[in-house]
Amino acid sequence: MRVMFVAAEVAPFATAGGLGEVVGSLPKALAELGVEVAVFAPRYARVSPDLPTVTAFSLEFAGGTKEVRLLRSFLPKSHVPVYFLDFPPYYERPGIYGEGDRDYPDNLQRFAFLSKAAVMACTELSWVPEVFHVHDWHTALLPLYLRAEGMGAKTVLTIHNLAFQGWFPRDMWEGIGLSKEDLKLAGEGEWLCALRAGILAVDAITTVSPTYAREILADGLGLDDVLRSRAQELFGILNGIDEEEWDPAQDAHLWARYSSEDLRGKAFNRRRLIQELGLCGAGPIVAMVGRLTEQKGFDLLLASLDRIMAMGVNLVVLGTGESRYEDFFKDAEKRFPGRVRALLTFSAEWAHRILAGADFLLMPSRFEPCGLTQLYALRYGTIPIVRATGGLRDTVQDVDQGGNGFVFEEYTPEAMLEALGRAVRLWQKDRRKILALRRMGMSGDYSWKRAAQKYREVYERVLSR
């Protein structure tokens, strides 16, 4: 079985979040199952232009002939090839999708070009996949280019986050080489939707957790009709994590390594985290790691920070995002010196260190298709406090039901504070139970093996038709 992943991101080369992590990990697990798999992605400025050139070719797009190169690398610790589409006018830019709070205005052209180039590159590579696995709206148009070329490969679309759908005004669509019939799949109005076209055109659709699959059928964020029309071909498959990259027993980022059998290294990481960040040391350390956006529940923090701090916790925040949240945490550091630390940056090293040193991870997400950070936290013995939505519901169960963390249902400050309060009280009164929760989390199976097998079953399903 030959499968090509086509995506806007691939870790560790260029990623903005969970999409890139999946594309950088799942193909390796599929290869271990005997699938012949490759990845196709843009060569952004952050990817070296000196990688080996595999081939060069031209293709017609946007009313002209574009000359491109394909460069090749491999996913780390694997033989899975990654083919980078080298076309500097579209991809030699500081950002993946945009800069600051603004998307690049030509994103439709940039990613439609990626989709068409992926189809055309197969001939150049003499490697035609049986399945194209596309991801989010950025490559959702690939099935339409595939159809235009008369190629019979099957297509699977993974929706990582339905909130990003790829809506653009009709006049932008005129130069990307799609027929009028194909454009109808994107809508009928003055604004057309790339994800809508993909949902209708692909052979199967997956999401990144079973709960999220059910949630988007209940509320499709404007795409309810097309999602429900494909309900029989929609599958929720829970993400895994790269257990080599996220392994406290061999993590080079940590001050000390540890395992579930010997947690002394976690205690050492906690002490070093207090020293490095200048925390007061008293009370549990509560971490938040990720993008500072409304989706992640940061508005609940804005409404309740004083009450959180009254519980005696230390709050550590790592990430970048909306300026209102960054400004809030800058001010919070001044208001609560030694109690609040905000590292407003993206740092893999600090993500590993914070998750190793913290006592709890707080993820009060408004919605969360899967979430990976809670899986990293569990692997590192850091107890998650989450809202029951999407993949958070699928991976964290409340301690009162014998589970591995603290869960709340309602998206309110009061519900979040109740769950956080239960966690703090347990930390204060029953360290043996806290230790048992750490070990429970670290003993879970968060690998890609199970998910890879389910994806293979989806591929086999579409190929059997």
Image (cartoon, rainbow, N blue to C red):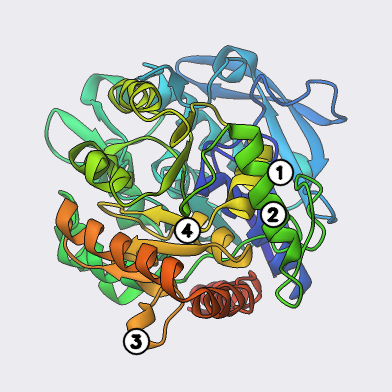
The residue wearing badge 1 is 123
The Cα–Cα distance between marks 2 and 1, rounded to whole angstroms, is 7 Å
The mark tally for this picture is 4
Query: According to the image, label 2 marks what residue?
Result: 128
Mark earlier in primary sequence (2, 1): 1
The disc, 3 or 1, on the residue closer to the chain's N-terminal end is: 1
Frontmost residue, 341 versus 56: 341
For the residues labelled 1 and 4, the Cα–Cα distance comes to 50 Å
Residue behind mark 3:
401
Q: Of callouts 3 and 2, which one flags the residue occurring earlier in the amino acid sequence?
A: 2
Tag 2 near tag 1, CB within 8 Å: yes
Residue 49, visible in the rendered structure: yes
Amino acid residing under circle 1: Thr
- Say which of 432 and 356 sits in front: 432
Residue at image position (60%, 66%) is: 381
Identify the residue at image location x=83%, y=56%: 78
As measured in the structure, the alpha-carbon distance from the residue carrying label 3 to the one carrying label 4 is 18 Å
Q: Secondary structure at mark 3?
A: helix
Mark 3, Cα crowd under 10 Å, few <14 / some 14-19 / many 20+, is: few
SS for callout 2: loop
Residue 235: x and y in percent read 39, 72
- Label for residue 360? 4
Disc 2 crowd rating (10 Å Cα; few below 14, some 14-19, many 20+) is some
Which residue corresponds to the image point at 11% horizontal and 34% vertical from the top-left? 189
Q: Could you tell me the amino acid type at mark 3?
A: Gln
Contact check, label 2 and label 4, Cβ < 8 Å = no
Q: Position of residue 76 (x, y in %)?
A: 81, 49
Cα distance in 3D space between marks 3 and 2: 49 Å
- Left or right of 153, for residue 290: left
Query: Which amino acid is tagged 2?
Result: Val
